[in-house]
Amino acid sequence: MIRLAGTLVSARNIDALDRRLIIKLSRDASEVSKSDGTTALLLSPGATAPDHCTAVAVTGHQCVPSRIAPYFELPSDCEYVADGDIIRLEPSKNRFRVLFRKSSAHNNFLVTEQCDNFCLMCSQPPKKVDDRWVLEDLFQTVQLIEPDTKAIGFTGGEPTMWGERFIDLITLCRERLPGTSVHVLSNGRRFSDPTFSKAWASISHRDLMIGIPVYSDLSTVHDFVVQADGAFDETVRGILNLKERRQRVEIRVVLHKQTFARLPQLARFIARNLLFVDHVAFMGLEITGFTRANLEQLWIDPVEYQRELYDAVTTLDDFGVPTSIYNLQLCLLDRRLWRYAVRSISDWKRDYFPACGNCAVRSDCGGVFVSAVYRHSKHIKAILQSGRSQ
Amino acid sequence: MTSLFHPKEHYERSLIAGYRLLPFKFTQLRENQYVLTNIAGEYFVADRDVVERLVAHQLSSSRPEYAELKSRHFLEDGDSTVGRDLLALKVRTKHQHLAQFTSLHIFVVTLRCEHSCPYCQVSRQSDDRLAFDLSWETAEKALALAFRSPANAFKIEFQGGEPLLNFDLIRRVVEAAELRASTEDRDVTFVIATNLAMVTDEILQFCRGHRILISTSLDGPADLHNANRPRPGRDSYQRAVAGMERARSALGRDRVAALMTTTQASLSRVRDIIDEYRRLGFDRIFLRSLSPYGFAVKTKAFDKYRLEEWLRFYKEGLDYIVDLNLRGEHFVEQYAAVVLTKMLTPFNPGYVDLMSPAGIGIQVMVYNYDGDVYASDEARMLAEMNDKTFRLGNISANSYEEIVFSDTLLDSIEETYPGSVPMCSDCAFEPYCGAEPVFHHTSQGDRVGRKPTSIFCMRNMEIFRYLIEKMEGSADVERIFRSWVARR
Amino acid sequence: MRLTLDSAVYRLDAVKKAAYRFIDRFAIDIRLENGSVVCDLIFSPHMTEEVRTALVVDFRKEILDQDLRERISEETAAVRNAILAVAFAPVSSRGD
């Protein structure tokens, strides 16, 4: 578990600053001087902040603030911050959020909290709020990301709520970060509009993938899970439009009590109707957001749906659809499915149980969500023989 | 669940208004069980009573069949209509081969052959090259015709007689075709159908250099093969096997394919035949039907009794092959694979005899040694029996347009289209089947055919039923069948 | 063997289509008479009574099946045409 956001320990010399700053951190003073204010100096322990630029330090490192230049002190559990990381500071509210960590493989940017679905298990519950500033900030953020970054992601809410402006953002990614692959999570509904799909395709990004959830082969079940009439039809049409324009699409299926029973039928449905998708990901449930409110409707111990999962995964595999399993622990998975399991839980929300202790396959396993404290399988246990099963 | 969320019933409220049928056909499987197929050829097995309720709009949404029928696009409900878009896409995919038009061009390079197989309709025991060989002048014109096809990728197959007896002509055609293909950015592949008895290193070198596939005959174990294929020296089998080995060494294992001819003698030996294929390192076999042409028709050897015998042969062979697969050995029955491609995927396997509309002309074209152009290989064989009904023209006398737009061809395709023809138009198996105008003309005197008495129909329906029953009976078998046809 | 079917219940077309499927097993003479569809089945002389009875049973079932098929066909004609129109629409017509 990594703390990404919170309250600043202190903030000095901030009167002349904007309400919100997005800055990159660097330990290289000359880079900071050239940056025209977009980069701040990340102080080493014991260092003194210079008077000509913004500085950031971690509390307890015995750094000395400048008397005139802005100076921000992060809590001690933010010791991980490093060169190349990007941070948002709100001096007036005394808050910070680490937006981007160079060392992480899981940099995902929230685009908006608005969404036209209302999934029972939403990990980022929608809010009817005008948060356009979040999207606008991302234009600044993207410009600070170093081009050797391998991958970034955009999520929400529903990133396409802002329509063409979001397309502009991805276009900026193509221009500024041509070597960085981009993954977008979307409910896909906006793409049922052919004009929007066409605009999306015009981005002509070298390595762009959209992850779109489809929860059932039946419209009524999907619409129920996402709590929106007509969502299934729009989502599937969106996928068809995207594939017609040769855009890369991944289908995501969250595994819970409302979706597990028809997994085999969903797999057949995908194999017959959406055979051309680039990837299918079956995802273990994260006990956060709305999931906690709807826990009794959603919770099922993963060991209880292994039969359906095996059937679904092998069906897709039989038809040549690349398939993975995310967020499920190896001790709960049918051994024949281990080869599909991916260590997918983001580092900042990953943990292990005491029972995992001396597990032989711990390093292959993705661990659990930190939110698993609220509900988890009774069957988590260390595996004693070593080596992954085929 | 908190009050922010609607219960499942809320999203099922439109079901009260009932469901709408999507187009489908049904045919009896066995007894009370029926096969339903939707417009894209996806099937579902249900009891007759379910079918009745379904059509009467009395099938309850709480029944398990309801969900399956909705998922597989036999019905739609509520405001969901995306099933129609998906069906349209699948139908489109199934037919996209039509835009490619003729993609198999058969060149009959000679009728001469040193074998004298009793069932063969087309060969001549002769050294008269002038009379029975394809000339370069004619071949050149045929090649020009082949290149008129809009297909980006097509195959040229050399047949005979024994094609290797006119190898020089093959060489010239290959070189000319490759030259032209490279200038037009098209992909042309080559196959030689040969008994390999006369193969030489020089020939194999050439094949290797031009990536030519070899398709050779293997009817089964030595005694069976030799009985079917007499030749001076009575060593057809030995030569075939030796030829295969040489060809494989020169070209690579996967460049040499074997095809069997089924005769009366084969019918009790299916396991032996399959084992022979396995022994020689093949991982597939095409359990072909008894040919109705030539010898067989002349002796009126083709009747329902023969069909039942053949079906036993086929089923025993298929069962044996499925068993091998269940025990971990990948081995494919190719006719089943053609049918299963249609049953399990939206793709078209492009197999001439099972195409709807008929594959004559639009899938395959045959250029005979004498310049006559035929709508299919069967059409050519028929001509050898003095029935030239399906001769489309002559390379020297007729233009491409005259050949391809000939009444013979167009009428045959249009009139026999299964989607419009009695019994076929109602049949649930129509998506898997094909029109076979030449066969029906030959066996019934009518290219549409009277399907209730058609051996082609009976044979195929039984195979379709058998494959579906096997899949319904075992998930493992279904997975095996998938492994034969799934591709990306 | 004669079958008399109420033409209000059994459509003539359905009877004819069903009869077609059985032409390998019996010949048939069909006519409309006083609101009935009258079918005279002509069996081959060597067929046993048992076989004939079984065939008649199958024939009746087939007539019902044909009737169902007609209903499906009528009901789905419009959506079938809509689907095929989309399936075979030229690519360029999709407003790019």
Image (spheres, helix red, strand yellow):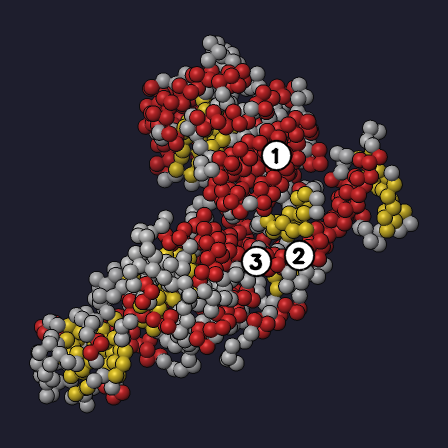
Q: Quadrant of residue B61?
A: bottom right
Residues under numbered marks 3 and 1 in contact, where contact means CB atoms less than 8 Å apart:
no
B415 is higher (above) or lower (below) than B300: below
* Among the 4 quarters of the image, the one containing residue B164: top left
Q: Name the image quarter holding residue B452.
A: top right
* SS at badge 2: helix
User: In the rendered structure, are the residues bearing label 2 and label 3 in contact, judged by CB atoms less than 8 Å apart?
Assistant: no
Secondary structure under badge 1? Answer: loop
Residue corresponding to mark 3? B71
What is the spatial separation of the Cα atoms under label 3 and label 1, in whole angstroms?
Answer: 33 Å
Is the C-beta separation of discs 2 and 1 under 8 Å?
A: no
Give the spatial CA distance, label 2 vs label 1. Answer: 28 Å
* Residue drawn at 54 percent across, 76 percent down: B6
Spot occupied by residue A337 in the image (x, y as percentages of width and height): 40, 53
Out of A26 and B479, give the one closest to the viewer: B479
Question: In the rendered image, is residue A276 in sight?
Answer: no
C3 left or right of A14 in image: right
Amino acid carrying label 1: it is Glu
Of all chains, the one bearing label 1 is B
Q: Are marks 2 and 3 on the same chain?
A: no
The residues tagged by marks 2 and 3 sit, at their Cα atoms, a distance apart of 18 Å
**Horizontal placement of A229 versus A40: left or right?**
right
The number of numbered badges drawn on the structure is 3
User: Viewer-nearest of labels 2 and 3?
Assistant: 3
In the rendered structure, find residue A265 and report the number of the disc placed on it.
Answer: none
> Mark 1 — residue?
B436
Instruction: Residue under label 2, please give it.
Output: C76
Q: Where is residue B76 in the image (x, y as percent from the top left)?
A: 61, 61
Q: Which residue is drawn at 63% across and 68% down?
A: B15
Q: What residue type is labelled 3?
A: Ser
At 20% across and 72% down in the image, what residue appears? A80
